[in-house]
Image (spheres, rainbow, N blue to C red):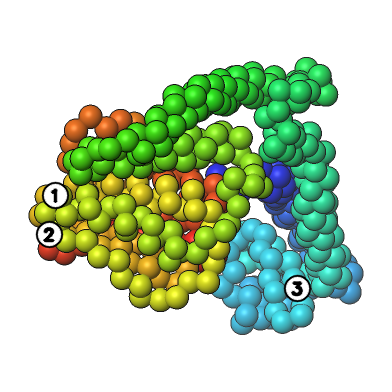
Amino acid sequence: MTSKQPFARRIVIAFVLMTVVVSGVFSLSIVAVVHLIEQRLISEEMHRELDSVLHEDLKYGRSPRLDAKTRFYASNLPQYAIPERYVGLDEGFTELVDGDQAFYAYLQEINGTRYLLVQEQSEFEAHENALFNVVLAGFIFTVLGAWGLGRVMAGRVMAPVSRLAQQVRHRDQLLPSAPPLAPEYPDDEVGQLARAFDGTLGQLRQSLDRERLFTSDVSHELRTPLMVIATSCELLEQAPLGPRQQEQLQRIARASREMQELVQTFLHLARGNRDETDFAATASLAQVAEQQCRHWDELMKEKGLGFECVEEGPDGGRYSPTLLGTVMANLLRNALHYTNHGHVRLFLETGGFRVEDSGSGIAQDEHESIFMPFVRGTQARGEGLGLGLSLVKRICAHQGWSISVHNLLPTGSCFKVRFHPPG
């Protein structure tokens, strides 16, 4: 019985094992007692019969007065010669079995003469076997009864635990209006567990509320300065500016739009609502990739990196341009940041995409941890907080996508996003 077994099954197994041990010991004790009593009683009875034959019959020249099932033999009397099959018997009581027949033999040696009584006991053995069969049947029925009783008891014991698990598993328990669990249970171990869940769920609700409020407040407060920046950019575009100023103005406008999209993304993730119209699936993978490539191509060239977008297979899905663009942008930004020489490539596939670079790669033991918030790899650079890949992971989980990473040879890394993870 391993700890991975369901708790109800472990209760049944415990019932059955306990019954097997107790009933088995009891049954074996019955068999042992029957054999012990049989040997002692029969031995004493046959000893008395042999004494009676020697001192009451043979002493006065009479034939042994025995019943039809008992035979008398003596080594010094030719008419009662001991048969060859009984010659090697030890002194005292012996039980013999010959095919379907059973015999009790009692041998006594007096002054070198061997006297033997042989009693046919097939009928007694039949009764004894019937008794043993009853004991065996009782043992089997007891084990089966323990199994049935164990199932009933396991169901009764686990019923409140299962009900508590269903209540805890229900998503409404995370709502502030969710009723406490403990009042529904008695003051026992399950009630203590329910109170522990109430305390933990209360802390979780408070933590989620603080996160939602913080995200909502920050996102809401950021909208005003972002609108001011966007409006100022529109006004400056109408002013006579030189090429250098126009380039900087466009970069400010792009950064403002990206910030607005990020604010919307954070609000969307904080609310956990997939049906918002702001994030409707209106764009194809190729359209989002084209927009991102236009944005990142210039930045890649400024760093001296080769950048290309390769379509390896058609994809007919529709996606939220904000969410998919955020994922793709963060992966391309990550590749740009950690690649000093070589190239960055964006591959579009059927049902997903991947970003490959010729950077320094990621240590194998960091492939899981880099998606955690505020975690940066050993190759971390700059003043980043380690939230980019965490945001990517959250969006993918929110949309039902999968993301994985592996290293390339001789150097570099590959981030792969699948829109429909294999089930």
- What's the CA distance linking mark 2 and mark 3? 96 Å
Q: Are marks 2 and 1 in contact (CB under 8 Å)?
A: no
Q: Residue at x 30, y 63 (%)?
A: 346
Tell me if residue 416 can be seen: yes
For mark 1, what is the residue?
A: 303
Mark 3, other Cα within 10 Å: few <14 / some 14–19 / many ≥20? some
Q: Give the mark toward the camera: 1 or 3.
A: 1
For mark 3, what is the residue?
A: 102
- Between 262 and 226, the one lying in front of the other is 226
User: Tag 3: residue type?
Assistant: Ala
User: Tag 2: residue type?
Assistant: Gly
Q: Is residue 280 left or right of residue 343?
A: right
User: Tag 1: residue type?
Assistant: Lys
Q: Is residue 113 left or right of residue 159?
A: left
- Between 199 and 375, the one lying in front of the other is 375
For mark 2, what is the residue?
A: 342
